[in-house]
């Protein structure tokens, strides 16, 4: 998915009150497009009910015995 | 050259006066050291990254924005060190708001590597790494959100411990990314790291994510043999600089000679885990800094402003997806990579320590790639939240240190320190000090 362009980045940051330094929007758009291309191999198996707090349980389960 | 044995206030003061003009490790040197007295760390000479608050004292956080800001509370980590009788000789330089891996600082001056001031110290705990390397103090606190204890430890040739997320209270320490921030010591040896961690680890009601898991006896845990250590030899040979690979694999052999068993393992998916770390780090850091980014963006350095801008464009769903996946990745790491071993061994950095020019504003087109290489093997650890220890294990042909990294299960700091101590009983890399 290559949905980001500099104009979109500028608009999203402007909507949050952030003024971009000159020349930055294109670099941020490129980085976002690159990260959108990453396919996480665990995502497909992630249970619907999983939320970020599952991490705390995993920390405890994985501790050394 | 072996480390000087004299860490009296007078001897440290003499070394600070001699080294400070060359390496800029301190931002404030106390006329009279704070604290001291009886306790586990009685009169131990320490100094800390300038982001650990002390009530009534300035914490600049490496920034222009917080220059002269006076804290109203004392961090739990400092309170515990004070109670143990430690001395604080001053506060140490750092990357601006702990958001940079090199040690450059536009506002307070770059911190320079004691082995060669043209080279980076690593960051963000730049002053901590430099001060310990030059033996200006016995140990120093740092923080580690993406490698900020381990990269300076590696680049400066000292021992640095990134604790498990929640093992050490962050109360009263400057936040960068609450899901990733950890605190740990940099010191001349694993044994000294154990002494510091013993004092600062443990539950703190002032930090809601601090863990109630019991704190091990790290010092008595230093004894013992028979560890099983996983290593991905071919990955290291293919991905690390040849000098880094030789030193790190040589360290693995030294551990084996000392009684450890080496087991070949597939490497974790460093790059996917690092990408998730960056998503979380950018999102949380930018939210933390949003008011200042709206009101006074020009008061950030260009490098930090650039990093903060990027976080405002991360989709909320991507941030939450990275956090939803975190537990699954941790379980996979422990079930696969650490399935029948105690530790995973790898370099701290795949590259040799770069120069300040290579990684600074004049670094040119290759600079972003080089910075990514510097953090390639540290960020994944923060995403998983597991502990890691970095130890010096050699020198490159430029005369700069090379760092070995050991990674363990959550709350297995004692295992890391035991392995580090065994390695340091068999080698003398940690006793080398920079000339001068």
Image: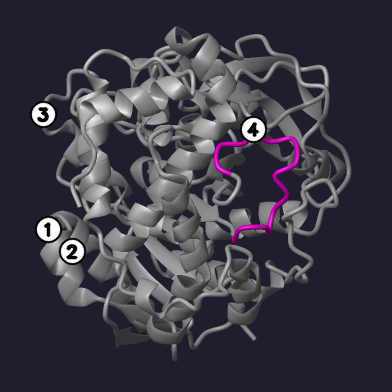
Q: Is the stretch drawn in magenta largely helix, strand or loop? A: loop
Residue that badge 1 annotates: B242
Asked if the residue at tag 3 contacts the one at tag 2, i.e. Cβ–Cβ closer than 8 Å, the answer is no
Q: Position of residue B311 (x, y in %)?
A: 42, 35
Q: Which residue is pictured at 26% across the width and 80% down the height?
A: B266
CA gap, disc 4 to disc 3?
Answer: 32 Å
Asked if the residue at tag 4 contacts the one at tag 2, i.e. Cβ–Cβ closer than 8 Å, the answer is no
Q: Position of residue B356 (x, y in %)?
A: 26, 25
Find the magenta span and give its range: B164-177
Secondary structure of the residue carrying numbered label 4: loop
Question: Is residue B235 positioned above or below B153 on the image?
Answer: below
Q: Position of residue B126 (x, y in %)?
A: 45, 32
> Which mark is nearer the camera, 2 or 4?
4
Secondary structure of the residue carrying numbered label 3: loop
Q: Chain of mark 4?
A: B
Q: Dot 1 surroundings within 10 Å: few (below 14), some, or many (20 or more)?
A: some
Q: Dot 2 surroundings within 10 Å: few (below 14), some, or many (20 or more)?
A: some
Secondary structure of the residue carrying numbered label 2: helix
Q: Are marks 4 and 1 on the same chain?
A: yes
Q: Which mark is residue B365?
A: 3
Residue that badge 4 annotates: B174
Q: Are marks 1 and 3 on the same chain?
A: yes
């Amino acid at each position: 998915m290559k949905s980001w362009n500099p104009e979109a980045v500028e608009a999203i940051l402007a909507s949050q009150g952030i003024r971009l330094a000159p020349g930055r929007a294109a670099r941020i758009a490129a980085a976002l497009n690159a990260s959108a291309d990453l396919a996480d191999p665990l995502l497909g198996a992630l249970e619907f009910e999983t939320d970020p707090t599952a991490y705390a349980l995993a920390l405890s389960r994985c501790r050394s015995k | 050259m072996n480390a000087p044995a004299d860490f009296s206030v007078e001897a440290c003061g003499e070394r600070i006066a001699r080294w400070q003009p060359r390496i800029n490790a301190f931002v404030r040197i106390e006329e009279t050291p704070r604290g001291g007295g009886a306790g586990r760390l009685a009169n131990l000479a320490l100094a800390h990254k300038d982001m650990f608050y002390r009530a009534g004292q300035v914490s600049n956080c490496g920034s222009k924005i917080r220059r002269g800001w006076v804290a109203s509370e004392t961090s739990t980590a400092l309170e515990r060190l004070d109670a143990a009788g430690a001395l604080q000789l001053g506060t140490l330089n750092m990357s601006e708001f702990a958001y940079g891996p090199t040690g450059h600082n536009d506002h307070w001056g770059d911190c320079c590597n004691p082995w060669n001031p043209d080279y980076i110290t690593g960051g963000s705990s730049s002053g901590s790494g430099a001060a310990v390397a030059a033996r200006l103090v016995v140990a120093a606190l740092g923080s580690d959100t993406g490698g900020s204890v381990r990269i300076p430890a590696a680049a400066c040739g000292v021992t640095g411990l990134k604790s498990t997320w929640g093992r050490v209270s962050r109360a009263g320490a400057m936040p960068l990314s609450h899901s990733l921030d950890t605190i740990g010591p940099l010191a001349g040896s694993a044994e000294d790291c154990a002494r510091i961690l013993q004092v600062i680890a443990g539950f703190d009601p002032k930090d809601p994510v601090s863990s109630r898991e019991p704190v091990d006896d790290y010092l008595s845990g230093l004894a013992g043999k028979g560890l099983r250590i996983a290593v991905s030899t071919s990955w290291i040979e293919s991905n690390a600089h040849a000098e880094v690979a030789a030193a790190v694999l040589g360290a693995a052999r030294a551990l084996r000679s000392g009684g450890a068993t080496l087991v070949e393992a597939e490497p974790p998916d460093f790059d996917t885990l690092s990408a998730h770390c960056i998503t979380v780090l950018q999102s949380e850091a930018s939210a933390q800094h949003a008011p200042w980014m709206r009101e006074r963006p020009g008061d950030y350095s260009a490098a930090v402003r650039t990093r903060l801008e990027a976080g405002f464009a991360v989709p909320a769903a991507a941030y939450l997806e990275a956090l939803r996946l975190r537990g699954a990745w941790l379980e996979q790491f422990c079930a696969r990579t650490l399935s029948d071993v105690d530790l995973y061994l790898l370099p701290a950095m795949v590259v040799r320590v770069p120069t300040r020019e290579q990684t600074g504003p004049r670094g040119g087109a290759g600079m972003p790639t080089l910075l990514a290489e510097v953090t390639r093997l540290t960020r994944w650890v923060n995403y998983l939240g597991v502990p890691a220890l970095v130890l010096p294990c050699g020198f490159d042909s430029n005369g700069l240190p090379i760092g070995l990294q050991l990674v363990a299960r959550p709350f297995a700091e004692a295992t890391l320190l035991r392995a580090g101590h065994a390695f340091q009983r068999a080698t003398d890399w940690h006793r080398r000090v920079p000339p001068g």
